[in-house]
Amino acid sequence: MSDAASAIDTRKTGKRALLAEFWSYFSENKGAVVGLGVFVFVVLLAVFADVVAPHLPQEQYRDAFLTPPFWQDGADPRFLLGTDAVGRDILSRLIYGSRYSLFIGVIVVTISLLLGVTIGLLTGFFR
């Protein structure tokens, strides 16, 4: 029984060693680490858009057409990035839009994977 337990420990240690080695090489590339951080940030924004976004993306504020961003004169503190031509908050629309962008990315990668595997299998079989 101790041989089986040690084999399981070796597999766990081996997986951890591979992960540690990967992270060691990955963390040397600062651009990759920054990219991973940005990607995780966007995914978290998309997942928690209902909590993070200050307004609903389709909600219109008739008193705030084309409000400039907060760093320009005449800005409204309710709208950090301003509003569009029909009074919708741009920041909220960007946050909710990240959901659609990530969803489309996942769908495109899935379709490409399925097509690539299918074409590869067919060309390998009929070679």
Image (spheres, helix red, strand yellow):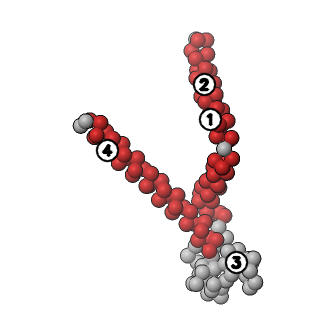
Q: Which of 107/36 is in front?
A: 36
Quarter of the image where the C terminus is located: top left
Measured Cα–Cα span from mark 1 to mark 3: 42 Å
Q: Secondary structure at mark 1?
A: helix
Q: Could you tell me if the residues under marks 1 and 4 are in contact, i.e. CB atoms within 8 Å?
A: no
The picture places residue 76, in percent across and down from the top left corner, at: 73, 81
The picture places residue 92, in percent across and down from the top left corner, at: 62, 70
Instruction: Please determine whether, in this image, residue 23 is positioned above or below residue 77.
Output: above
Q: Secondary structure at mark 4?
A: helix
Q: Which mark is residue 69?
A: 3
Residue behind mark 2: 14
Residue behind mark 4: 119
Residue at the outermost left position: 126
Neighbor class of circle 3 (other Cα within 10 Å; few <14, some 14-19, many 20+) is: some
Say which label, 2 or 1, has the lower sequence index. Answer: 2
Q: Could you tell me if the residues under marks 3 and 4 are in contact, i.e. CB atoms within 8 Å?
A: no
Disc 3 marks a residue whose amino acid type is Pro
